[in-house]
Image (spheres, rainbow, N blue to C red):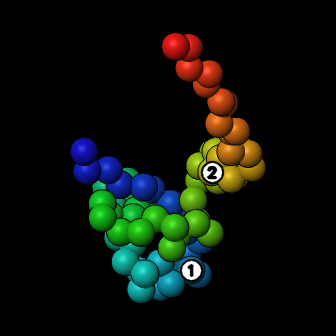
């Protein structure tokens, strides 16, 4: 699936995101990160919901592996 990430870019920062590879969707009036681009480059402009979700993933502690006893 080819998906685009729409980002929120203040007008005065448009040149920065354009230089990073973002594209302007004239029909919607929004900037987006095209499929195949590294979205982490645009973290500053991610929607707040995505930032919260990603922050939650970073905070999760890795689960310990449980030892399984084999019965013979």
Q: Residue furthest top?
A: 72
Residue 50 is marked as none
Sequence-wise, the earlier of marks 2 and 1 is 1
Q: Nearer the viewer, mark 2 or mark 1?
A: 2
Query: Which one is nearer the viewer's eye here, 62 or 26?
Result: 62
Residue 19 image offset from top left, x and y in percent: 41, 86
Residue pictured at 66% horizontal, 30% vertical: 66
- Camera sees residue 63: yes
Q: Residue furthest front?
A: 72
How packed mark 1 is, by other alpha carbons closer than 10 Å (few <14, some 14-19, many 20 or more), is: few
Q: Is residue 64 left or right of residue 30?
A: right
Q: Secondary structure at mark 2?
A: helix
Residue 37 image offset from top left, x and y in percent: 35, 69
The residue identified by callout 2 is: 54
Residue 42 image offset from top left, x and y in percent: 52, 70
Q: Secondary structure at mark 1?
A: helix
Residue pictured at 59% horizontal, 53% vertical: 47
Query: Which one is nearer the viewer's eye here, 68 or 25?
Result: 68
Residue 13 is marked as 1
Q: Quadrant of residue 9?
A: bottom right
Q: Quadrant of residue 56?
A: top right
Q: Is residue 24 left or right of residue 59?
A: left
């Amino acid at each position: 699936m080819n998906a685009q990430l729409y980002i929120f870019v203040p007008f005065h920062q448009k040149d920065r995101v354009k230089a990073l590879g973002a594209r302007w969707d004239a029909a919607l009036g929004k900037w987006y990160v095209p499929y195949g681009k590294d979205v982490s480059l645009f973290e500053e402009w991610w929607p707040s919901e995505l930032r919260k979700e990603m922050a939650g993933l970073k905070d999760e502690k890795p689960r310990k592996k449980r030892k399984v006893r084999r019965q013979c």
